[in-house]
């Protein structure tokens, strides 16, 4: 998946975009945390913020935004 697929979403911070791409690829929170050297709780918080900002309720909704 290319980062270009999410670059048009300007409401998200660079970190949120990074996490959103990994979530949309099916990477689990614990694995995202390890990859980005952050805590799993931080990933959960970022994920929640992404869902609120994009007005979505599921990973499927995120995937559809990233891959229109």
Image (cartoon, rainbow, N blue to C red):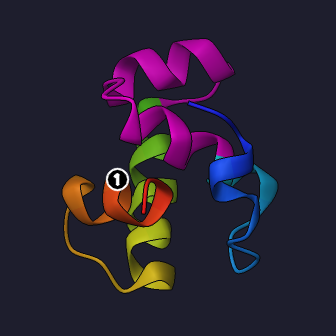
Write the residue at 46% across / 80% down. Answer: 54
Q: Quadrant of residue 28?
A: top left
Image coords of residue 40 (percent x, y): 43, 32
**Residue depicted at x 52% and y 56%:** 46
- Per the image, is 28 magenta? yes
What residue sits 68% from the left and 70% below the top? 12
**In terms of depth relative to the viewer, which is nearer, 49 or 27?**
27
Residue lying furthest front in this view? 68
Instruction: Give the class, few, some or many, for how many residues have Cα within 10 Å of label 1's Cα (few <14, many ≥20).
Output: some
**Magenta-drawn segment:** 18-39
Q: Residue at x 76, y 59 (%)?
A: 7
- Give the answer, above or below, for where 6 lies relative to 25: below
Which residue is under mark 1? Answer: 63
Counting labels gives 1
Left or right: 39 as drawn, with respect to 3: left
Disc 1 on helix, strand or loop? Answer: helix
The quadrant in which the N terminus is found is: top right
Vertical comparison of 68 with 55: above or below? above
- Left or right position of 60 against 1: left
Which part of the image, by quadrant, shows the C terminus?
A: bottom left
User: Magenta stretch: dominant SS?
Assistant: helix
Residue 36 image offset from top left, x and y in percent:
66, 22
Q: Is residue 26 magenta?
A: yes
Depicted 51 relative to depicted 46: above or below = below
């Amino acid at each position: 998946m290319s980062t270009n697929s999410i670059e048009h979403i300007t409401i998200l911070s660079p970190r949120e975009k990074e996490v959103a791409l990994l979530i949309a690829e099916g990477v689990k929170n614990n694995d995202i945390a390890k990859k980005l050297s952050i805590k799993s709780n931080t990933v959960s918080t970022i994920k929640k913020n992404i869902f609120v900002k994009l007005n979505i309720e599921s990973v499927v909704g995120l995937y559809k935004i990233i891959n229109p």
